[in-house]
Amino acid sequence: MSYGYIKIGSEEKAFIAKVEEISGQNVYSCYQCGKCSAGCAFSYKMDKTVNQFIHLIQLGQKERTLDANTHWICASCFTCTVRCPREIDVAALMEAVREISLRENPEKVRIADLPKESLEKLPNIALVSNFRKKTG
Ligand code: SF4
Ligand code: SF4
């Protein structure tokens, strides 16, 4: 995927630094091999694949990163973390982006706003997982 010419200035660097601080990972360790995306059971639901998502972080593209659904679809199964040849804890990157998103917009996902029919259909584990994402 090409994003054209992107200047990595102070805002971009601040976003990269924040993701790295929260996750404890070096995003530039990633060499875009795509193994994380290939092993993710939820890739088909993501508008940016896992490695595309990491590429956005490497470029400091905060808005595009937060706008993606990738970190919300992620189920924190750690398959990507286990598969990464660079030993990057990819799941921790997902968690870091969720945290940044929720710090900026704590009301992004409100359980109270979910329709009753969805609450009846959703398995308990999905709700617990959602709460964990929101409070992690
Ligand atoms: S598996 Fe690791 S190195 Fe490969 S694209 Fe994913 S994060 Fe990057
Ligand atoms: S931790 Fe998230 S991104 Fe990684 S393989 Fe599991 S669901 Fe996919």
Image (tube, helix red, strand yellow):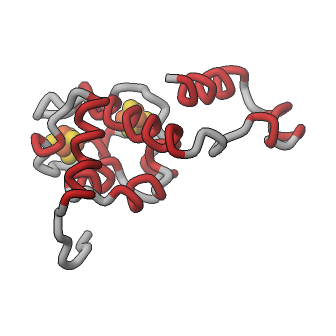
Judge whether residue 41 can be spotted in this image.
no
Report the number of discs.
Answer: 0
Percent across and percent down for residue 89 are 25, 28
Is 51 drawn above or below residue 64 in the view shown? above
Picture coordinates of residue 99 (x, y %)?
45, 35
Residue drawn at x 82%, y 33% is 119
Please give left or right for residue 64 compared with residue 84 in the image. Answer: right
The quadrant in which residue 39 appears is top left
Q: State the residue at coordinates (26%, 73%).
A: 3
Quadrant where the N terminus lies?
bottom left
Residue at (38% x, 55% y) in the render: 65
Check the image and name the residue furthest to the front: 10
Dividing the picture into quarters, in which one does residue 114 lie? top right
105 w.r.t. 92: above or below: below
Tell me: 100 left or right of 81. right
**Which residue is at a point 85% across and 31% down the rendered structure image?**
120
72 w.r.t. 48: above or below: above
Rendered location of residue 71, percent (x, y): 45, 43
Q: Viewer-proximal residue, 50 or 56?
A: 56
Q: Is residue 17 left or right of residue 74?
A: left
User: Which quadrant contains ligand 1?
Assistant: top left
- Of 56 and 34, nearer the camera is 56
Percent of width and height locating residue 8: 17, 63
Question: Which residue occupies the extreme right position in the image?
Answer: 116
Q: Is residue 25 visible?
A: yes
